Each structure stands twice: as structure tokens, then as C-alpha cells.
Amino acid sequence: MRRNIRYFITGLFLLCGIFPTKGRILSHSMLSPEEYPIRSVWPNYGLSTKQRYFSEYSEDYIHWSLSAVHSKVSDINDIEQVKELVFAESFLERIFAIQVLSYKFGKEALPVIKNSIDDPEPRVRCMAARMMAILGDKSGFERMRKDIIEYTQKNKKNDSSSEQNNLSLSMRTRLKRLNHYDAINAAHVLSEFGDSSGFELAKQTASNHDNSIIVRVYAIEVLTELERTIDESTLKEQGIEPEAVLIEIAGSETDTRILQHLIGFVMNNMKPTSQIRILEKLQESTNSSGTILNSAKRNVERSKNQLKLDEQKNN
């Protein structure tokens, strides 16, 4: 019973953006802006998506997935036992099983992971597509693109649906946010591997103050991921400018929670020159003050020092 409770709490931590590290719990809301750039779960610019999930940089993250699956099987090294969890009733169990199958068994587990790309739970589909891509199979991306279109259209339909009008305002709002979250989650998976299909959705979501904070934060992460995974010339060819969107947000955003996450994702995912341009804009903003302003100043100096070190190495 105690193990099941711990397993359930772990799932809530991971789904809510709360991560265990070095024996303590680390969450977005608990981090001060100056701590954000050294968050252990997401290392700095330069690492591949595979490294960020399956390497010494992500040891704590995968440890919790392993622990969750271990509590459900007698032998975690038995692929057949872990495979059974992919069909569990709990979507959390299915997510953890997909991660562990990818981590421990690699391409041997690819067929069963591919089956999960049609799971009825969007979060399971996203994890399946992500793990497939890490193992070298990007065929799941088509489902992610389909999910973005489907959930975006569903939101529009819900605005005018007679069935939706029979629901309370709070329930309609909740359904809309869930659809939006699912779409952004799919866009995030694509962005981690250099696919910009979710750019327009992320751009509109991040800039719209009417959206919930959580989807805006995830949208900002998508934009920084695109800068991390796609080179500048390719971004220009595709006609997308994630950095320009982030600079605009830095100059106009008033919510300190959004700005705190912006600083963190920019420092974790983007190259120093982009970090400087975005955070200097944040410094200039009349909306910046207190810890946000101080964090922007400190991180600009940090990025400038990194540029000097890079120049010295090149010389």
C-alpha cells in the first residue's frame, strides 16, 4: 500500500512539472530565477534530446520511472513483464512502462512502444512518440501533427457547440484548457527533435494572455526548444522566428511567473547570443523589477562571460 501511494505521488510530481533531485523535491514554483538555469532535469544548451532523457544528466528523472515500474513487476529486467504495463488501466503506468522499455531494452521494445502511438490518452501518445524518436523512429510525429490539428479544431468547435452550451462555464473552460494542453504537449514533443509543426500554435499560445499560465509556459518552452534543435539558417528558410516571439514576450509580459519561466527556458535551451538579446529586452521592460530584473542582469553577465570563454577556445 505504501509503495502504491509513493508511486501515485511520483506520477503527480512528473506530470505537474515537479522533479526529484538529490534527495529533495524541485518544482517550477519553488525555484528562484537565479536557480533556474542550473535545474538538473534539463541541462544547458548543447545536449541532444536523448542525452537529456537517458544519460547521467537525467539520472534522477529516469530513476523515478524505474522505481514506479519496479513497484508493479517482480523482475524489471524481464521485458515481457514490463510490456504488460503498456496495457495497464492507469495511463501513468503506461507512461512509465514506455519510458522504462525505451531506457532498458532499446530497439527491442520498439514494436510495443509503436502500438502506444494510438493510445486513447494523449499524454501516453506523446511519450510514445518521444521514446520512438529517441530510438531512431520518427514515424510517431505524424500522429503528433494530427493531434495538434485535431485538438485545435476541437477547441474552435467547442466554442460554438450546442452541447458545450449546456455545460457550466467552468466545465467548458476546463475542457478547452485540457484540449489546449494536449495540443501544446504534442508540439513540445515535435520541437524536441527539430520539427517546427507546432510553431504557430506555440506562438499564439505564448502571446495570448487569456490562456492559462501552464499552457503559456509550455508554449514558451516549445519556442526555446525550436531554437535549440533547429539551426539558424533552417529557421530562416522555414520563415519562423522563435527568438523574435520570445523577445516580444520579454518586453511586454507583466506576469512574473511567466517571466520566471521564460528566463529558465531561455538559459537552459538557447545559445548565449540569443540569451543576451532576450534578457536585455527584459531588462529594458518597465514590467521588470525585483528578482526578475536582478535575475535578467545576472544571466546577461553570465551569457557574456560564456561568449568570451567560447571565443578563447576558438582562438
Image (spheres, rainbow, N blue to C red):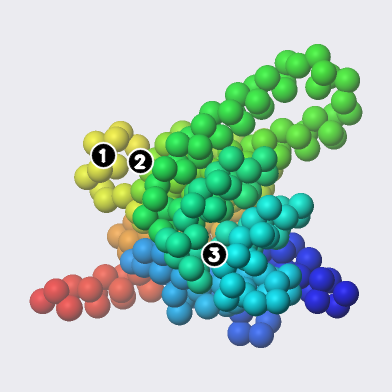
Between 114 and 12, the one lying in front of the other is 114
- Residue at horizontal 45 percent and vertical 62 percent from the top: 108
Image quadrant occupied by the C terminus: bottom left
Q: CA distance from mark 1 to mark 3?
A: 37 Å
Q: CA distance from mark 1 to mark 2?
A: 7 Å
Three-letter amino acid code at the position of disc 3: Leu
In percent of width and height, residue 99 lies at 56, 63
Mark 3: secondary structure: helix
Give the residue pinned by disc 2. Answer: 241
Q: Decide: few, some or many residues near mark 3? Use Cα within 10 Å; few <14, some 14-19, many ≥20.
A: many
Q: Decide: few, some or many residues near mark 2? Use Cα within 10 Å; few <14, some 14-19, many ≥20.
A: some
What mark, if any, has residue 236 been given in the picture?
1
Give the residue pinned by disc 3. Answer: 101
Choose mark 1 or mark 3, whichever is in front.
3
Between 137 and 192, the one lying in front of the other is 137
- Residue at horizontal 35 percent and vertical 37 percent from the top: 240
Mark 1: secondary structure: helix
- Residue at horizontal 73 percent and vertical 70 percent from the top: 72
Q: Is residue 305 left or right of residue 155?
A: left
In percent of width and height, residue 229 lies at 35, 54
Choose mark 2 or mark 3, whichever is in front.
3
Q: Is residue 255 left or right of residue 133?
A: right
Q: Is residue 35 visible?
A: no
Three-letter amino acid code at the position of disc 2: Glu
